[in-house]
Image (cartoon, helix red, strand yellow):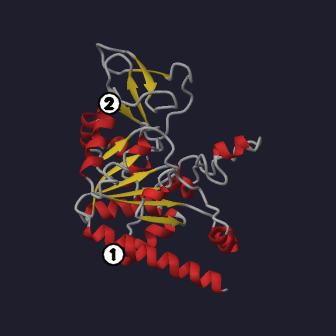
């Protein structure tokens, strides 16, 4: 029981520190990975039930629990932080599209690995944002089997997500790099920080002392409580990242729990998710295509 009380006190203390960092930051940027979407029913990669973790154990990857996931509490918390001018920009390695669905403006996010709801014409570059994720594309050519609706084009459409060994568009990486150079607080959530070049962005200027970096990765609370004593006494770690020693604050907890506590500390209310039906919003689609870097 004493270990449990100490754990809660330690987490509460770190939440207060993180909230103070956010209040005092001049340019706050969030970096997200697959771990923020697990509560939406989407598997991550290196977590306890992740795709690669299962492969390493020689077992089948657990199936996703939902067909059409919606933004989580964490996604919606970012929307409110941005609305209240705490959060300036968001960089994501996720291609699930949940940040845009939550209401993050498309000119204030860099989706480094694309968006699973988008396909683009391989000929003219016209972008199509769909109501659901793009399924059934050819994994060698990334062609979806559909064609551009522009009368003078009729080019073949392709999925726009970026896989391993594929390069991301320069304009997208440049946008993320520019924001990373500006920011004085980087918050990394749900990412193992092992995928290049994305993992290098939040650490830019950290060594110079111009920036604070905070890393949050989820853990199973039962596991954490039971083995808390062992972790601290035996120098074990949960989902350790290569940048742990460089960060100003390291938090082991579920992303949703951390954001719920941080928002309480900031006296902000996390909005409920509302389907914005972006795929049918002509004005949004026009703005989206203007900012879309994957051409």
Q: CA distance from mark 1 to mark 2?
A: 36 Å
- Tell me which residue sits at (38%, 74%) in the image: 17
Q: Quadrant of the C terminus?
A: top left
Question: Could you tell me residue 138's position as x and y percent?
Answer: 56, 22
**Label placed on residue 266:** 1
> Could you say which is closer to the camera, residue 238 or residue 123?
238
> Could you say which is closer to the camera, residue 295 or residue 121?
295
Name above or below for residue 84 compared with residue 68: below
**Label placed on residue 87:** none
- Label 2 Cα crowd, 10 Å radius (few <14 / some 14-19 / many 20+): few
Question: How many circles with numbers are drawn on the protein?
Answer: 2
> Could you say which is closer to the camera, residue 115 or residue 248?
248
- Tell me which residue sits at (46%, 41%) in the image: 95
Question: Could you tell me residue 238's position as x and y percent?
Answer: 61, 60
Residue 16 falls in image quadrant: bottom left
Residue 108 visible here: no
Residue 200 falls in image quadrant: top left
Q: Is residue 152 left or right of residue 253?
A: left
Of badges 1 and 2, nearer the viewer stands 2
**Label placed on residue 170:** 2
Residue 101 visible here: yes
Q: Quadrant of the N terminus?
A: bottom right
> Could you say which is closer to the camera, residue 29 or residue 250?
250
Question: Could you tell me residue 181's position as x and y percent?
Answer: 26, 47
Name above or below for residue 98 compared with residue 272: above
What SS does tag 2 mark? helix
Question: Could you tell me residue 237's position as x and y percent?
Answer: 61, 61
Q: Is residue 158 left or right of residue 56?
A: left
Mark 1–mark 2 contact, CB under 8 Å?
Answer: no
């Amino acid at each position: 029981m004493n270990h449990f009380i100490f754990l809660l006190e330690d987490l509460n203390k770190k939440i207060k520190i993180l909230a103070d960092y956010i209040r005092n930051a001049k340019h706050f940027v969030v970096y997200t990975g697959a771990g923020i979407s697990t509560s939406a029913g989407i598997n991550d990669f290196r977590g306890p039930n992740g795709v690669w973790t299962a492969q390493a154990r020689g077992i089948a990857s657990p199936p996703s629990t939902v067909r059409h996931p919606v933004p989580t509490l964490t996604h919606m918390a970012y929307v409110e932080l941005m609305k209240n001018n705490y959060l300036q920009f968001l960089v994501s390695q996720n291609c699930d599209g949940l940040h845009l669905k939550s209401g993050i403006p498309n000119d204030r996010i860099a989706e480094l690995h694309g968006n699973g709801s988008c396909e683009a014409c391989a000929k003219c570059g016209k972008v199509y944002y769909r109501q659901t994720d793009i399924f059934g594309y050819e994994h060698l050519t990334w062609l979806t089997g559909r064609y551009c609706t522009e009368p003078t084009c009729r080019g073949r459409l392709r999925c726009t997500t970026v896989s391993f060994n594929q390069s991301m568009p320069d304009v997208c990486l440049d946008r993320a790099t520019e924001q990373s150079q500006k920011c004085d607080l980087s918050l990394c959530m749900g990412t193992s920080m092992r995928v290049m070049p994305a993992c290098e962005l939040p650490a830019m200027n950290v060594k110079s002392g111009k920036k604070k970096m905070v890393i949050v990765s989820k853990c199973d609370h039962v596991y954490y409580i039971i083995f808390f004593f062992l972790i601290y006494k035996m120098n074990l770690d949960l989902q350790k990242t290569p940048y742990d020693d460089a960060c100003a604050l390291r938090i082991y907890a579920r992303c949703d729990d951390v954001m719920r506590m941080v928002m309480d500390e900031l006296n902000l209310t996390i909005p409920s998710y509302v389907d914005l039906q972006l795929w049918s919003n002509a004005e949004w689609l026009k703005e989206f295509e203007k900012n879309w870097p994957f051409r």
